[in-house]
Every structure is written in C-alpha cells, then in structure tokens.
Amino acid sequence: DGNLKRDAYFGVGPGYRVINNDNTAWRVQAAVGIRYTKAVNVLTVDAADDQAGTFEYDTNTDVCYVLSSRFYHKFNDNFFLTNDTDYLTSDANDTITNDLGLNFKMSEAFATRVSYKTEYVSDRAIRTDNTLGVSLVYGF
C-alpha cells in the first residue's frame, strides 16, 4: 500500500559456497539481525490540497532472520546469468525477493542486462509485484 517509508536491516551470519569454479558460483547465507521499519499513516487529508494533512508514524524494531542465495553462471565471455534470492522475516512482515538477470557484453565498456524481479511482501494488499528491467551498463 506504499506506507512503508523506512526498512533497514543489520545482521550477521554464516555463508557457504556450494559451487565455486571458473564458470559457476553459488553461495547461500543465513543471518540473524535487527530490523527497523517506519510506516506513515495518513489520518486526515485536506481536500483542497492533496499534500496537506495529518500523519502518524509507526516505528518498529525487532529481531529478524534472513536466508539468501546468490547464483552466477558464465556461458561464455559475453553472456552470463545471475539469480539472487532473499527471504527476510520479522514481526513487521515477510519479504521475499528474486532477481533473475541475463547479461550480454556488447563491447569492452558496454553491456546489456535484462532482468525479471519478483517481490512478495506479506502485509500488502497486492502481495506480489513483478518488474521487467532492461539496462545499459557502462563499465569503466
């Protein structure tokens, strides 16, 4: 619903490299930490000015847990795939993100990235959001 204005996390935990060679790398991580969230609730809105109104802020700091996976595979020198997945849970909500990307090297300085990101948040009215991205990447 767009009312979450801050979402910060700090944690520590172990990680393990499941695969680690020249073409493929996959690591998994788990962590425990502290999560701080700040949400704004609109109490009143002036009909004459959409920007004016009364707001109330709800803040929450609690223990959270994170599970992560990072995968990389190089098909050749010009084409590689990445898949990053994160699961974060706390009293505030559960959040899962997955970012799948295909990267194409076009020259020494330029590359193209096509990605598909899925985000799930347990306490939103529409829980799942999908985004298709196309990026031009400049390396220097």
Image (cartoon, grey):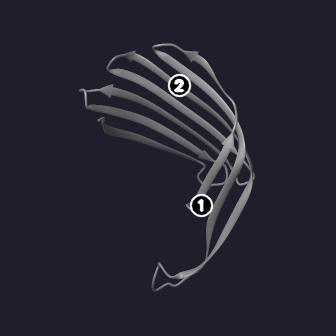
Disc 2, SS = strand
Disc 1, SS = strand
Residue 112 lies, in percent from the top left, at: 31, 32
**Lower position in the chain sequence, tag 2 or tag 1:** 1
Amino acid type, callout 1: Leu
* Relative vertical location of residue 83 with respect to residue 48 in this rendering, above or below: above
Task: Say the numbered circle drawn on residue 81.
Answer: none
Quarter of the picture containing the N terminus is: bottom right
* Relative vertical location of residue 75 with respect to residue 47 in this rendering, above or below: above
Q: Residues within 10 Å of mark 1 (few under 14, many from 20)?
A: some
In depth, the one of 98 and 123 nearer the eye is 98
Quarter of the picture containing the C terminus is: top left
- The residue that appears at 53% across and 32% down in the rendered structure is 84
- The residue that appears at 59% across and 59% down in the rendered structure is 6
Residue 107 lies, in percent from the top left, at: 23, 27
Residue 8 lies, in percent from the top left, at: 61, 53
Q: Is residue 29 left or right of residue 117?
A: right
Q: Label 1 belongs to which residue?
A: 4
* Relative vertical location of residue 79 with respect to residue 135 in this rendering, above or below: above
Residue 12 lies, in percent from the top left, at: 69, 39
Q: Evaluate if marks 2 and 1 touch, with contact meaning CB atoms under 8 Å apart.
A: no
Q: Is residue 140 left or right of residue 74?
A: left
Q: Label 2 belongs to which residue?
A: 71
Q: Residues within 10 Å of mark 2 (few under 14, many from 20)?
A: some
In depth, the one of 111 and 93 nearer the eye is 111
Q: Nearer the viewer, mark 2 or mark 1?
A: 2
* Image quadrant where residue 115 sits: top left
Q: Is residue 133 left or right of residue 60?
A: left
In the rendered image, the residue lying farthest to the left is: 107
Amino acid type, callout 2: Phe
- The residue that appears at 40% across and 28% down in the rendered structure is 102
- The residue that appears at 60% across and 44% down in the rendered structure is 120
